[in-house]
Amino acid sequence: MDFFYKPPVERPDECQVLEENYMNCMVQKALKDNVLNNRCVLDSILWFHLECPKSLENFDNPEFFKVKFRDYFADIKEDAELIYEKLPHMERLRKEYELPTSADDVKLKKEVVEWVKENKEANPARILDDDGENDTYLDDRWDQHEMGERGYGPQRRGATITAEDSAKFGDAPVFKF
């Protein structure tokens, strides 16, 4: 047991987890503990105050506080949208890549087949035989089955809450990190 003072560690990973718990506790207490599941660990608030004083002093700044809560609710909103909204491109992906009921349900795209055939020699999974011939490979999984048609979906859309949405939370200017 040490009798000497040890300064706060300020480890970024630990402070991030403690800060997230601090945010959860503030939201839960604002709702007067009327929540489905308790995500607040009150002991961790003490550790956040002791181990991360620099992170904690940011919460005294009203602009930082507004930005933190905006980002916190934006993350929750985006997660809920991904779960509950049925976006057209996500439905297409679900229909295409969901567990097929039979082999006839598997659909392949020609563009990907051409790319695999063009880059066959550069594939690191293919290993030359000991005799050094280029036409035989130890790993012949790519040659066993005929590749058909396979493709890629559209890119995922970005966050739906922008910095301009900060006006909803007050007159403070946008916080610059």
Image: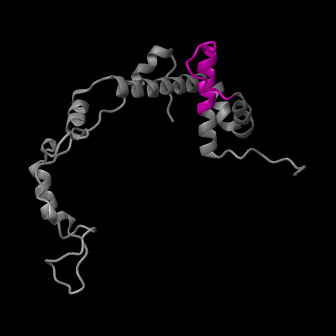
Highlighted range, magenta: 20-41
Residue in the image at 13% along x and 48% along y: 108
Q: Quadrant of residue 93?
A: top left
Q: Considering depth in this image, is 101 or 72 the residue closer to the camera?
A: 101
With respect to residue 138, does 173 lie above or below? above
Name the residue nearer the viewer: 61 or 109: 109
Look at the image and name its color scheme.
one colour
Does residue 17 sit above or below 39 in this rendering? below
107 left or right of 39 in image: left
Q: Is residue 118 left or right of residue 99?
A: left
User: Is residue 100 something one can see in this rendering?
Assistant: yes
Q: Position of residue 105 (x, y in %)?
A: 15, 41
Across and down, in percent, residue 157 comes to 30, 33
Asked if residue 30 is among those painted magenta in the image, a careful observer would answer yes
Q: Is residue 26 left or right of residue 99?
A: right
Magenta highlight on residue 148: no
Residue at the image position 57 percent from the left and 22 percent from the top: 37
Nearest the viewer among 111 and 174 is 111
Residue placed furthest toward the right: 3
Q: Residue furthest front?
A: 102
- Side (left or right) of 161 relative to 61: left
User: Does residue 119 appear in this view?
Assistant: no
Residue at image coords 63%, 28%: 22
Residue drawn at (53%, 23%), measured in percent from left and top?
69
Residue 90 at x, y percent in the picture = 26, 32
